[in-house]
Amino acid sequence: MLDVAATIDALIERPSETVLLADYDGSLSPIVDRPDHAVPLPAAIDVLAALVGRLGRVGIVSGRPVEFLAAHLPVDGLVLVGLYGMESMIGGERRIDPRVVPFLDAVAQAADEADARLPGIIVERKAGVSVTLHWRLAPEQEQEVLGVAADLAARYGLSELRTRLAIELRPPVAIDKGTAIDVFVTGFSVASYAGDDTGDLAAFAALARAQADRRLARAVRIGVRSPEMPPALPDSVDCLVDGPDGLVDLLAGVARAL
């Protein structure tokens, strides 16, 4: 396991050949009860702005829509990857993976039915591409939400992705943070990703494979601790930091060193 100083050293060794990617919720933004209340730490915006242009690529890989990320992280030159890789925004241009387009009507219908069947549950529609059902504010309804999600997924031909106190219904396409990482680290020698949740495990695994296959000279996997982090996370990373404050402090150390 690397300490923070060693992690910073790894990220500044070859700046122009280094890509730095991070999750949003729970990594740059504290965990909150309502999805629309999640805002990044003020220092996160400043440190990302300081890193863009000093490293080869700086970006966010999140389950959020890219338009949400663009509004909350207004940093020129920041690459945004949303919905676990189903959409991206580079230079202000939003792109959606064409493989998900045939399922957009099914997602909309599933979202409408979830609203009708689950009063009191937050039904988060994500740019029309996926929908997440949150039971954080109603933990007693967890099994009901999971049952409805399974029924909707089966009837509308969607897949399910379990996240923190929520479940997402999404197009049944082989896209996750791992496949997004494979795309956005291509051509770089050093790559790093920071995350805190189950969906981030695929990104960490992709980095490990890229290093093992020698597509990367160095992979640096940064885990962000929280009371809700998955049990597998500590064994999947090279460095652990304490919450969003710890991650922003590490990134600030990289910016100072550069």
Image (cartoon, rainbow, N blue to C red):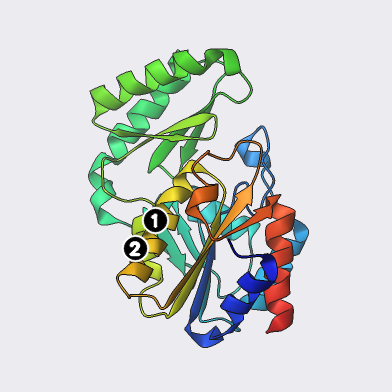
- Name the residue tied to disc 2: 209
- Considering only vertical position in the picture, is 152 above or below 226? above
Residue occupying the point 23% across, 31% down? 157
Please state if 223 lies on the left or on the right of 157 as rendered: right
Residue occupying the point 55% across, 70% down? 78
Answer with the quarter of the image where residue 180 lies.
Answer: bottom left
Answer with the quarter of the image where residue 51 lies.
Answer: bottom right
Amino acid identity at mark 1:
Ala
Residue occupying the point 61% across, 38% down? 35
Residue 112 in picture, x, y percent from top left:
41, 25
- Considering only vertical position in the picture, is 172 above or below 66? above
- Name the residue tied to disc 1: 205
Helix, strand or loop at disc 1? helix
Q: Which residue lies furthest to the front in this view?
A: 1
C-alpha span from label 1 to label 2: 6 Å
Helix, strand or loop at disc 2? helix
Q: Are the residues tagged 1 and 2 within 8 Å (C-beta)?
A: yes
Is residue 95 at least partly visible in the picture?
no
Foreground of the two, 237 or 56 = 237
Residue occupying the point 41% across, 78% down? 217
Amino acid identity at mark 2:
Arg
Quadrant containing the N terminus is: bottom right
Q: Residues within 10 Å of mark 1 (few under 14, many from 20)?
A: some
Residue 135 in picture, x, y percent from top left:
56, 23
